[in-house]
Image (tube, grey):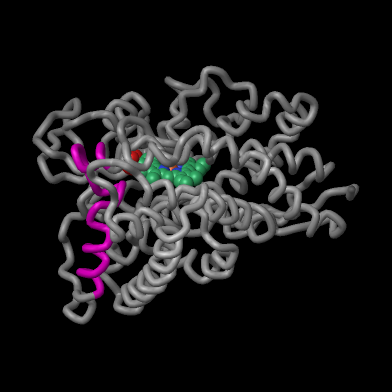
Amino acid sequence: MKLDLASLNFTTLATSPTAYECYAELRATHPVLWSEQMRAWVLTRYSEVEPLLKDPRLIAFRPAPAVMPPAAVQPQLAYLEELHAGRFFRIDPPAHTRLRKLVNEGFTPSRVQKLQPQITGMAHQLIDQVVEQGQMEVAGSFAYPLPVLVIAALLGLPTDLFAQMAAWSKTLLLFFGAQYVQAGYPPAQVNAIYQMHKEMEDYLRTVIEEKRRRPQDDLISALITSDSDAPLSDRELISLCIVLLFAGHETTMNTICNGLWALLRHPDQQQKMAELPALIPAAVEEMLRYDAPVQFSKRTAATDFALGEVAIRAGDVLWLGLGAANRDPTQFPEPDCLRVTRSPNRHLAFGTGIHFCLGAPLARLEGQIAFRVLGERLRGLQLTHEPSLRQHSLFRGVEELQVTWQASK
Ligand code: HEM
């Protein structure tokens, strides 16, 4: 493939059908490329992306103030900035260390493991609703509801969360992908994001007050009752819940859909998994490598430094290509083949370094249960047609995934 760098569109590259061919070309010819469009360096080689994710010369992403937001939306933006000032993706040590430590105390391996029977039950219930039909749209019927139910159970949110999330999901994606920033802060988008945050804040305040009165065995209660010297303020807790609600469902939904899509295009690998369910954990890792739900991690340079021949300046933004590094042949033999037995598999789908995905153990558990239940319940799964990808600059996932199967149980 001969890449036309001038016409390469980085707002859609991550969800382009030819993304992986483009990354291969970039790795070979322009591994550290300046994109004038994104005003950022784009990196695609594993040998650079992996160490840079752990490099203290890079700090959390700060958007370059390229466009001044219109005056009409500045109060809304100020509110968002204040609410999320301390959110995970935007902070560095020591603030990051404090937050991560506090959340880790509640988000323990045992709390995650305890969810296993509940997640399995939820996955079966979702399949019960469609099994007789012999067909489903996977995102809507399975891959979206499952992580929403799970994150609700983890946080201890009431069951009405499901209806609420349906209204919030798309706007959350807009906010966390920062597309409205790239688009120059269109007032309609900023207002929708602001309105959604107000609704989420009201909803979560009520929940937090209730849990303060009657703590339960859930993550919000654990954070409220923490005996830390510097516990989370209500505002920090609300921001954290919003981050977890988003991070906990969007990426896991894409893991299930992207993974199933890949598996159904590789019937030999599907067969292997069916014959040996013990392969499921390795297969889920391979699905994450093969088609990573988060394609780029963004960082800002804290200082000037040289990257090979390239001079990086303090304040420069770097887009570290997780999806591109995961297909780097110097790290993964035959990187464009899905191999459910791949070992070792040091993929970067969850990032690495201090921002390594907090929810990775939960996401892994959910992915493994989802594929076990799909494999047990739906025999002869097939794609109805090739799905299209939902356009986004960071998050890679399908619009919808239609499948059929033979027998029902
Ligand atoms: C398969 C599903 C998931 C994928 C692929 C994924 C991917 C990632 C990646 C790549 C990062 C690092 C971002 C960076 O380096 O800038 C990250 C961070 C994070 N993830 Fe996940 N994630 C998934 C599921 C989850 C779940 C289920 C939760 C919570 C319930 C979660 C919560 C977080 C949080 C809070 C961070 C920020 C951690 C920090 O900055 O210290 N993620 N995730």
Residue 199: percent from left, percent from top: 41, 73
Q: Is residue 86 magenta?
A: yes
Residue 155: percent from left, percent from top: 49, 52
Q: Is residue 116 magenta?
A: no
Q: As drawn, is 216 to the left or to the right of 206? A: right
* Region in magenta: 76-98
Q: As drawn, is 124 to the left or to the right of 101? A: right
In this view of the protein, which residue sits in the foreground, 325 or 123?
A: 123
Q: Is residue 192 visible?
A: yes
Q: Is residue 25 above or below residue 187?
A: above
Q: Residue furthest top?
A: 344
- Which quarter is ligand 1 in? top left
| Residue at 25% across, 49% down | 90
Q: As drawn, is 66 to the left or to the right of 28? A: left
Residue 95: percent from left, percent from top: 21, 43
| Residue at 21% across, 41% down | 92
| Residue at 52% across, 38% down | 111
Q: Residue furthest front?
A: 213
What type of secondary structure mainly makes up the magenta span?
Answer: helix
In this view of the protein, which residue sits in the foreground, 171 or 40?
A: 171
In this view of the protein, which residue sits in the foreground, 76 or 313?
A: 76
Q: Residue furthest bottom?
A: 72
Question: How many numbered marks have been drawn onto this rendered protein structure?
Answer: 0
Q: As drawn, is 172 to the left or to the right of 31? A: right
| Residue at 29% across, 55% down | 236
In this view of the protein, which residue sits in the foreground, 267 or 173?
A: 173
Q: Is residue 1 visible?
A: no
Residue 349: percent from left, percent from top: 45, 36
